[in-house]
Amino acid sequence: MQTAIILAFILTGLTNDAKQIQVTDKTSSQESAAPAPSFEDILTWLPPNTESLLVANGPFECHRVDTKESQDLLRMLRRMCAGPVLGEVQDKKLTGQKISLAVHGGRRFRAPKQLGLGPYEGCSVVVFERDIGKGHELVARSLQSESKQVIRMQQQQVYCFEKQYEKDTWNIYVVQPAKNLLICATDKGYLAEVLRRREKKASDRAFPVALPQWKCVNRKAPFWALREFNGPRAIAGVPAESELPGMVYCFDPANEKIGKFHYFSNSPNAADVLSASWSRGAKATVKQKEAGVIEVIVDATEDKNGNFPFALMLSFGFIFCV
């Protein structure tokens, strides 16, 4: 199976086969949006044992999936961040809307039963620059008519979908708590926790300030990701015994071709393990940046086998088989 085909499956965010419809929102650009949640707000919504955090800073437009997406790394990463939201909703109702922030949290990543992307618990939080306007009603009607069922959760209407991909059955849950906000989850329990924490304004948060990873995060980058290992590890083939408890990846196409990884480990052989791991794919430069921090700079232009997108996703926790 070719890389582009595999990525098309992953990047559609579990898209369905419904006819895509573009809706023009005639709401005045002067109309004020509902108060947008901050990034810090969203961190308090995510369960504290969330393992991976993906962030796409806007503004950027929703767009329909096409085969060129696998050739545009930033566009691919934004699609991963918005996840199933863009698959179940955007391609039909939100094309052209501008996203100001997309945050994806995930945990308990599992291998698929056979092929494709493995199930996991997580959700995407997508904040739009302004209220969706008339698109809000169209989205709600579309979700209502196409969902398997509608349930109530924390005073919110949740649209439930069931999708079969290869041998795995995926359950997708979509909710719109505000006119400029969409949340889409892959697990009912995870979503319930997110909505409960949002409603009660939880005092704790996922990825606390004290984590050493934060010192390597460029929060202004168009895309960045942070990982804190709370369970089984699948990080670009790196074995668990190499003791890599954390990872950061930042990508800014204006300043660098691919971006940088920072791995956090006090293991004396961590740099050697990473060098061996990355040598199987794209050209990588590995160096000890400081005590406990190893920097990896990958040149994907040398990735003749097209393995870099797969290594990148594994680094975030996603497991898939081809």
Image (cartoon, rainbow, N blue to C red):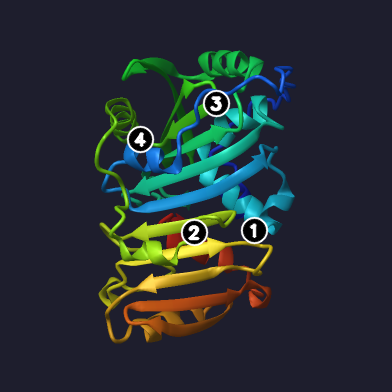
Tag 1 or tag 2, which sits nearer the N-term? 1
Q: Nearer the viewer, mark 3 or mark 2?
A: 3
Circle 1 — which element?
helix
Q: Is residue 190 depicted above or below 296 in this figure?
A: above
Q: Are marks 3 and 1 in contact (CB under 8 Å)?
A: no
User: In the image, what residue occupies the spot 42% across and 49% down?
Assistant: 118
Q: Helix, strand or loop at disc 3?
A: loop
> Which residue matches tag 1?
73
Indicate which disc, 1 or 4, sits on the residue closer to the N terminus.
1
Relative horizontal placement of residue 60, taking residue 271 as reference (left or right): right
Q: Which mark is residue 180?
A: 3
Mark 1 to mark 4 CA distance (whole Å): 27 Å
Residue 239 location (% of width, % of height):
32, 73
- Give the CA separation, mark 3 to mark 2: 28 Å
In terms of depth relative to the viewer, which is nearer, 47 or 101?
101
Separation (CA) of disc 2 from disc 1? 12 Å
